[in-house]
Image: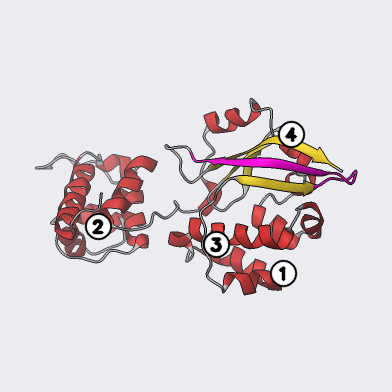
Amino acid sequence: MILPDDDRRRRLGAFLRAQRERLAPEATGLPPTRRRRTPGLRREELASLAGMSPTWYTRIEQGRDVSMSPAAAGRLANALNLGSVARRHLFELAGLAETARPGGGTDALPAELAASVTVIEAPAYVLDASWTARAWNGAAAALFGDWLGGADHNLLRYVFLNPSARRFVVGWEERARRLLAEFRADTAGRVDEATLTALIQELRTGCPSFGRWWDEQQVMGREGGERAFNLADGSTLRLHQLTLSPASDPGFKLVVLLNGTATL
């Protein structure tokens, strides 16, 4: 449901105030003090932790008409020590696309997500917010040896910079262009992050096709469907891709490749 701007701003202010008041100063590294008329952090303390002026933050909390950038919303979420669900709620109330936490794809991989890969018989792997594989099973390692068996497990680097990907992926150009459009859509709110900026520049330098297709500004949702691969024995393996994102950690993606058949 799309809320009217006034209602959305009031809800955002109320949410921020509630989160601020329940956060103990010592949990943020501030020294404890006995003289506090209200619980939690003061407005000026939260503003300082988030790198913004107290006046500007107060206007946000009061539901005033203030424009907030994704970077500012991210700093508030980090200052408030928000979990993934609360962080996503803050961005939704602010009418913004959620950004990743600092460090891009370096968030700790949830143990249950890593464990789920190992019990899947079909090739399966987990991608982080920068589309770097963080966990995979033996079936995936056997299929994607040149990617998962190397030192760099970023999917974009493999597809665009590793010559073996052009031989391995059936219809490489079509798949690469679609992958790029999916990546652009998935990282739309984070393209100014230093890690992503560096990755995009590296891919531009190493693969002229990447630069041309990136400038086309195509966006697509990451969908399932058939994926085909040329195997070393001359056969073609056809799989159906299923991509899932855990509700508690939407920055990660679990990718499973099902129902493979090999043809000559």
Q: Left or right? Give the position of 210 relative to 262.
A: left
Q: Is the magenta stretch mostly helix, strand or loop?
A: strand
Q: Which amino acid does label 4 sit on?
A: Ala
As helix, strand or loop, the secondary structure at mark 2 comes to helix
| Whole-number angstrom distance, CA of label 3 to CA of label 4 | 29 Å
As helix, strand or loop, the secondary structure at mark 4 comes to helix
Between 135 and 239, the one lying in front of the other is: 239
Residue at x 63% of width, y 63% of height: 177
**Nearer-N-terminus badge (2/3):** 2
Badge 1 vs badge 3, beta-carbon distance below 8 Å: no
Badge 1 vs badge 4, beta-carbon distance below 8 Å: no
Q: Left or right? Give the position of 24 relative to 149.
A: left
Q: Which amino acid does label 1 sit on?
A: Gly
From the image, tell me which residue sits under label 1.
206
From the image, tell me which residue sits under label 2.
47
Residue at x 75% of width, y 53% of height: 169
Mark carried by residue 139: 4
From the image, tell me which residue sits under label 3.
196
**Nearer-N-terminus badge (1/4):** 4
As helix, strand or loop, the secondary structure at mark 3 comes to helix
Where does residue 191 sit, x and y in percent of width and height? 49, 64
**Nearer-N-terminus badge (3/4):** 4
| Whole-number angstrom distance, CA of label 2 to CA of label 3 | 27 Å
